[in-house]
Amino acid sequence: MSDSITGRPLRRAVFALYALTAAVLLLGLALGRPDTRRRNRIPLPVRMLSSALVLAAALLLWKDADARSERATRLVAGGMGCGLLGDLVMAKVIPLPQHVAFGMLAFGAGHVQYIRAFLDRARRVGATTEGWPYTACADWPAVGVACGVALAGWWALVRNPAVDPTLNHGSLVYALLLATMSGLAASLALQDRRYAPAALGGGLFLASDLILASELFRKTHFSGIGDAIWLTYIVGQALIVAAVGLDRRVSDGDDGIPAG
């Protein structure tokens, strides 16, 4: 229903949600007061609201999808839903023991959904070039580079022998999973520049989580670190949602795959 009369209001609603998200974050920065540790200016309710608004946009884009884009938009909406759950756990709005571990599990589940969505898009993009086998092979160099960056970042910024080895190893597995998602987004963008926002979003997500993990495991701190983590994270999420959900050309017959 990409360009249908019923679809256009939904897409306008998505843009309105994104504008509202930007507005509440800017107001949070402008009017919020630094907390006692000078970690955040953006208040917690504003951060959680911005995540919920991006999820609402993802759900609207899923509703707007046609048969050929439904799977990818559904997966991205599921990934963003896992992200909101992870946000609530990490912020201790949902009180759980070992909130860091449970938060990583929630975000990890979201990355799996994004990976599946990017592979679905790559298969359709590849149908216009050299087919699925070529596309599958083309994905992995970018994934390898992203995993190398994540491994170096984990070693330099996150790994801490004084921390429980299970958490250390879990953070490495999580970083490599996130890097796989980011690398697949970059590979998709190299095949089709319409997905450049997804690649940028994946990169911002990776940067955000490396800073957060460094704070958690190495006690890294600077003024406004929480705001830096949140803004890179939520912008990354919004770019991933938009890149997949607002893409319509691959679902309008340009991918060479017949409907049905």
Image (tube, helix red, strand yellow):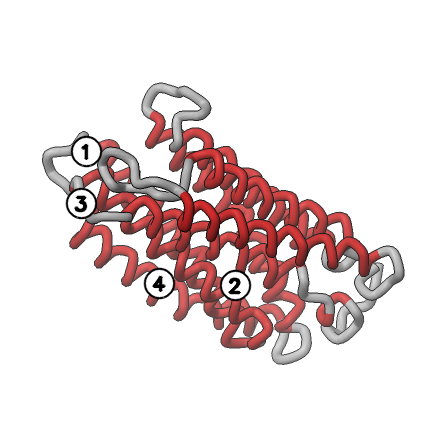
- Toward the front, the furthest residue is 31
What residue is disc 1 on? 165
Q: CB of mark 4 within 8 Å of CB of mark 2?
A: no
What residue is disc 2 on? 198
Disc sitting over residue 220 in the figure: 3
Q: Residue 81 falls in which quadrant of the image?
A: top right
Q: Position of residue 43 (x, y in %)?
A: 41, 37
- Dot 4 falls on a residue whose secondary structure is helix
| Figure check: 165 above or below 227 | above
Q: CA distance from mark 3 to mark 4?
A: 23 Å
Q: Position of residue 182 (x, y in %)?
A: 43, 59
Locate the N terminus and report the quarter of the image it occupies. bottom right
- Dot 1 falls on a residue whose secondary structure is helix
Labels 1 and 4: the sequence-earlier one: 4
What residue is disc 4 on? 146
Locate the C terminus and report the quarter of the image it occupies. bottom right
Q: Position of residue 74 (x, y in %)?
A: 67, 47
Which of discs 3 and 1 lies nearer the camera? The answer is 3
Q: Residue 164 falls in which quadrant of the image?
A: top left
Q: Residue 244 falls in which quadrant of the image?
A: bottom right
Labels 3 and 4: the sequence-earlier one: 4
